[in-house]
Amino acid sequence: MSGIDSTLERTNRIFWQSLLGHIQRELHGRPANAVLDVGCHDGGLLKKLAAALHPRELIGIEPDAHCRDRSRFRLHSLATSVTVIHPEQWSKVPSTSVDLVTCHEVVHLVDDLAGLLANFARVMGSHGTAFLVTGCHTENAVWPDWSAQLRAAGQVVFDRSPFEIVQVAHAAGLHAVIRPLRRDGWIVYDPDNSEFKYPSLAALLDHQYRNKLLFRLTKPQ
């Protein structure tokens, strides 16, 4: 695994663990036979989901070709079916075929949010659930500095508000509820070696326990 990939997984580990805890509680023991991760990078979150939920099918959506190849390599033995595709290939995922969708820190990178959430709604089964996580939004005080840093590095990013995500989800036919992703636990932060900085401890605490949001999206029954 490259240094960048390794750093990404270390940074996200606590958030992925928290997300997985929410997923396990929300599923109430229901099987998740088909699991899809949007922005799967090199398959780190899908690997954790496979270990916890034992799905028959793993699906990753990822724009970077190297990461798609890496995901296939890491995941090939973890489910009966493993598919990792480019975002332009959503049509390869059959309608109403997915039990669980995850999406961690992706919406600020997506131009067509309505199209993304419409794809969620299309592929989710009637009892399917999507869990979308973002701390990169306009109500997070560190986002203006982080977004400027990303744009200076050549990354195209979009300013999203939490209520915009809810409104677009509702327009796609999904019921959205929100909560902080984390409410307690240790914070892992090395100010000397972190790419994205916090101006104060208060800002760090706010990001971890208030502004890192979890959206649960379901189809109205």
Image: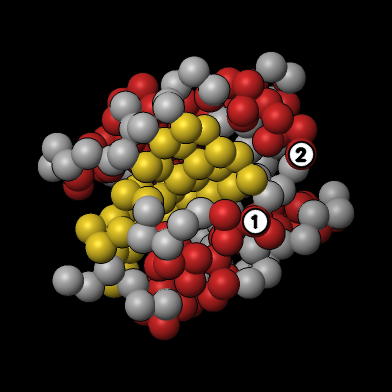
* Residue at image location 50% in from the left, 65% down from the top: 119
How many numbered marks does the figure carry? Answer: 2
* Residue at image location 43% in from the left, 27% down from the top: 80
* Residue at image location 46% in from the left, 57% down from the top: 94
Residue 190 shows up from this direction: no
Label placed on residue 201: none
Amino acid type, mark 2: Ala
Horizontally, is 160 left or right of 56 in the view? Answer: right
Horizontally, is 70 left or right of 94 in the view? Answer: right
Residue 191 lies, in percent from the top left, at 63, 30
Distance from disc 2 to disc 1, alpha carbons, whole Å, reads 13 Å
Image quarter where the C terminus lies is bottom left
Disc 2 and disc 1 in contact, CB within 8 angstroms: no
Label placed on residue 89: 1
Residue 116 lies, in percent from the top left, at 54, 66
Q: Is residue 80 above or below residue 23?
A: above
Residue 120 shows up from this direction: yes
Residue 113 lies, in percent from the top left, at 57, 71
Q: Which residue is mark 2?
A: 65
* Residue at image location 42% in from the left, 77% down from the top: 172
Q: Secondary structure at mark 1?
A: helix
Amino acid type, mark 1: Gln
